[in-house]
Image (cartoon, rainbow, N blue to C red):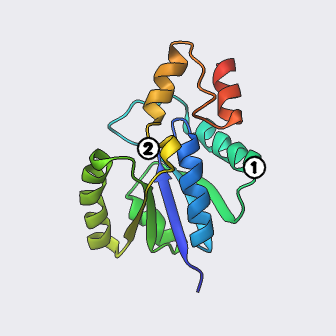
Amino acid sequence: MPRIAVVPGSYDPVTLGHLDVISRAARIFDEVHVLVVHNPDKDAFLPAPDRQLLIERSLQEARVEGDITVATWSMGLLVDYCQQVGAEVLVKGIRSQIDLAYETPMSIVNRDLAGVDTVFLLPNPENAHVSSSLVRQVAELGGDVSPYVPRAVATFLQRA
């Protein structure tokens, strides 16, 4: 039976840290679903279809190998998607204690609701300070985001 994992996030936009987590998940699990999810607590910078496309392009550019599906999910619980695709594991990147404090209660509820466990991956130290919100701020103020995002994202943001 294949080991299927879901790597959820807003990916608004996808960063090099995200790519690191996705590529490591692809080496651990047989099948990985990168899931662009709607976060009701955040106003989206990029529409979900653009985020999905940028993830797909970034994975191709980086030559990330594995059985990877990129999808979006905006209605229902995250564990509903997991059950739909047969995933028993969520993979989350954790940059700091703040991320851990935020993710822990959700992880417990996901396990309680549907038996879906969460695996936390620590970031590559060179990407530990990078977040999508930081990238958005730099991009909105006309700064160079290329050290923090895949080339496809940097190019897309420069045109926007």
Residue drawn 59% across the image and 25% down it: 145
Residue drawn 24% across the image and 51% down it: 101
The residue at which mark 2 appears reads as 38
Is label 1 or label 2 in front? Answer: 1
- Name the image quarter holding the N terminus: bottom right
Q: Kindly indicate whether the residue at mark 2 contacts the one at mark 1 (C-beta within 8 angstroms).
A: no
The percent coordinates of residue 109 (x first, y second) are 26, 64
Q: Earlier in the sequence, mark 1 or mark 2?
A: 2
The residue at which mark 1 appears reads as 60
Give the secondary structure at mark 2: loop
The percent coordinates of residue 106 (x first, y second) are 28, 58
Residue drawn 72% across the image and 62% down it: 65
Give the secondary structure at mark 1: helix
Q: Is residue 145 left or right of residue 101?
A: right
Image: 9 above or below 159 = below
Q: Residues within 10 Å of mark 2 (few under 14, many from 20)?
A: some
- The front one of 17 and 45 is 17
Q: Residue furthest top?
A: 141
